Image (spheres, grey):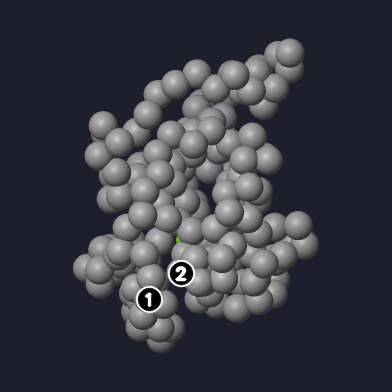
Amino acid sequence: MADIQRTLVLIKPDALQRELVGEVLSRFERKGLKMVAMKMAHLDEATLTEHYGHIKDKPFFPSLVQYMRSTPVVAIVYEGIEIIDEVRKVVGATNPRKADAGTIRADLSMNVPSNMVHASDSIDAAATEIKRFFTDDELFMYEKLTDRFHFGEGI
Ligand code: UDP
Ligand code: MG
C-alpha cells in the first residue's frame, strides 16, 4: 500500500474576511480527509520569508506578505495515503483564473495573492512546513472510522 503522508494547509486571510473558512473545511471534510491538527496563527515577516523562501525575490512578494499578515490564518494538518497531491488537487492551481472548475481556488476566488488556501507541494516541503507550525504533541493520532472507505477495502 502507498505511504501515509501528512500535509500542511493554511486557510488564508481572504477566506477569513469573506467568511468562507467553514466552506473550505467542509470541502476537505467531504473529500474524507483526516485532520490531525488545527490552530489559528498570526504570521510574522520572518516566518513568511521562510515559508515563501522560494519566491522571496519576486516583485509580488511584499504584497504577499502584507496580505498574509492582514489577519490570522487557520493552520491544519491532514493525514492519509498520497494526501499531499490529493489536497493540491482539491485546492487547484495557484492562479484561480487558471484553476479547474470544482477546485477551491477556481470556485471561490479570482486573484493572487488572495487565493484562499496554501497547501504543501512535496513530501519535503510538508515535513518542513508542519514543523514550522506545530509541535509533535499538537499532532493527534486517532482512528477515523471512515478511513475504511477512503483508504481501505471499502466496507
Ligand atoms: N502568488 C502571487 N502572485 C504570483 C504567484 C504567487 O501573489 O504570481 C502568491 C499566491 O498567494 C500563492 C503564493 O504566492 O499561493 C505562493 O506561491 P506558490 O508558487 O508557492 O503557489 P502555491 O503553492 O500556493 O500554489
Ligand atoms: Mg507553494
Q: Is residue 119 visible?
A: yes
- Circles 1 and 2, Cβ within 8 Å, touching? The answer is yes
Q: Where is residue 13? Give x, y as percent.
A: 46, 69
Nearer-the-camera pick, 134 or 24: 24
Quadrant hosting residue 95: bottom right
22 with respect to 10 (left or right)? right
Q: Where is residue 23? Give x, y as percent.
A: 63, 55
Residue labelled with disc 1: 70
Which residue is found at the position 65% from the left and 59% from the top? 104
How many residues crowd around disc 2 within 10 Å: few (fewer than 14), some, or many (20 or more)?
many
Where 26 sits versus 61, above or below?
A: above
Which residue is found at the position 40% from the left and 39% from the top? 37
Quadrant hosting residue 55: bottom left
How many residues crowd around disc 1 within 10 Å: few (fewer than 14), some, or many (20 or more)?
some
Label 1, label 2: how far apart the Cα atoms are: 7 Å
Q: Name, please, the residue furthest toward the left.
A: 46
Residue labelled with disc 2: 13
Which residue is found at the position 43% from the left and 42% from the top? 77
Q: Where is residue 42? Give x, y as percent.
A: 30, 64
Q: Is mark 1 within 8 Å of ligand 1?
A: no
Q: Name, please, the residue furthest toward the right.
A: 101
Q: Tag 2 or tag 1, which sits nearer the N-term?
A: 2
